[in-house]
Image (spheres, rainbow, N blue to C red):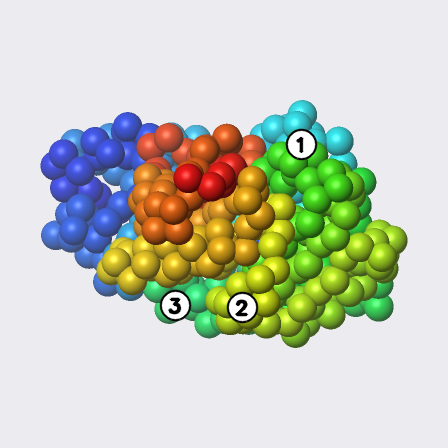
Amino acid sequence: MQVPALYLKRGEDTRLRAGHLWVFSNEVDVARSPLSAFEPGQVCAIVDSRDKPIGVGYVNPNSLICARLVNRGLEHALDKSLLVHKLNVALALRERIFDEPYYRLVFGESDGLPGLTIDRFGDVVVAQATTAGMERLKDAIGDAIAKVLKPRQLWWKNDASIRAMENLPEYAELGAGERSNEPMIVREAGLEFECDPLAGQKTGWFYDQRGNRDHLQHLVKGKRVLDVFSYLGGWGLRAAACGASEVVCVDASQPAVEAIGRNIARNGFADRVTAVRADAFDHLKALREQREHFDVVILDPPAFVKRKKDLAEGRVAYRRLNELGMQVLARDGILITCSCSYHMPRSVLLDGVQQAARHLDRQAQLLWHLQQGPDHPIHPAIAETEYLKGFVLRVLPA
Ligand code: SAH
């Protein structure tokens, strides 16, 4: 294969051989292969100090993670045919687990495609590249998606802020297919949600929480439910479908709240579900002042700890949020609390919940651990791929 070699220093192949896919810039033998000789995103062979190739990957000389391994061995070029193979491998897992074509098809490193996310919404596909390597492969990825999925539309939602780490601009565009006035729809557990591939959050829908929302079936029948940070009403509408008597969704985003309104109507829950546009902390305080109580409170906030150095501040925010959540919880209530911050450890979230419970003189019982669903597989060698954590707790008077 005619691609330039990126040579590692002695011993720096150990992590890759143990399963990891990243090369950091200080691990490269720059005397043999100067990083400045590579263009951002250029395909390379990753080779150890004894000239043994590890595999094919791509380089970004401007990034701390200066290369990512895409395929072990050098038999296959990094081209459409390899991408088709990897998409088919990813698809086989999803088709085994899910009855309908609504899922995350590719979860980056965990599916052997570092820097690439692909979500499937029936015949609409939303993809996101977060590295220069994947950005450069965009056309081949588009061709591979066309071959494997034959979608009606492919959207590129390349607006994640982490793209800045690779010096990539933020944009969103239709990659293939025709624009239409029909909204993009996600189907989950018999419900339909309207979402927006261009203006929505992330790639449009939080598939990572789908399996966690299944717990609602045991918890909400005939109960009052508060869904905080509701986005399009995923948790709230699922609660209504499981027989909740009343559901209130709260989100700060006006477009999200308007979409919840349409999703309520689409699923026939106008009698039981309402959506409020408000800041979560302010609204929880207002509900507390009004002495409102809910049997089930769901807290599914955006990541409060985006960088490691934000942990101290973030843990206080999670603790405060959980305390507010408990203050509007009925005497024998259920608290569902989550964090999608990779840098926030599960144990720290649970400590915060426990501290909040003691502060309010209440007792918490942990019923279920929550994690990202199987269409977001965890790569055992790459800790960063495990990010979503949460708990279903019963909160009692002390
Ligand atoms: N629970 C959702 C996902 C939530 S994503 C689901 O299961 O699909 C986080 C949401 O929090 C986004 O919709 C965002 O608009 C909202 N948000 C961010 N900051 C907020 C704040 N301070 N108050 C209320 N909502 C906020």
Three-letter residue code for mark 2: Glu
Quadrant containing the N terminus in the rendered view: top left
Q: Which residue is mark 1?
A: 218
Closer to the N terminus: mark 3 or mark 1?
3
**Left or right of 251 on screen, residue 14:** left
Closer to the N terminus: mark 1 or mark 2?
1
Q: 74 and 195: which one is in front?
A: 195
Q: Is residue 3 visible?
A: no
- Spatial distance from mark 3 to mark 1, Cα to Cα? 43 Å
Three-letter residue code for mark 3: Ala
Q: Residue at x 53, y 63 (%)?
A: 288
Q: Residue at x 55, y 44 (%)?
A: 331
Q: Quadrant of ligand 1?
A: bottom right
The count of marks equals: 3
- Spatial distance from mark 3 to mark 2, Cα to Cα? 42 Å
Q: Which residue is mark 2?
A: 289
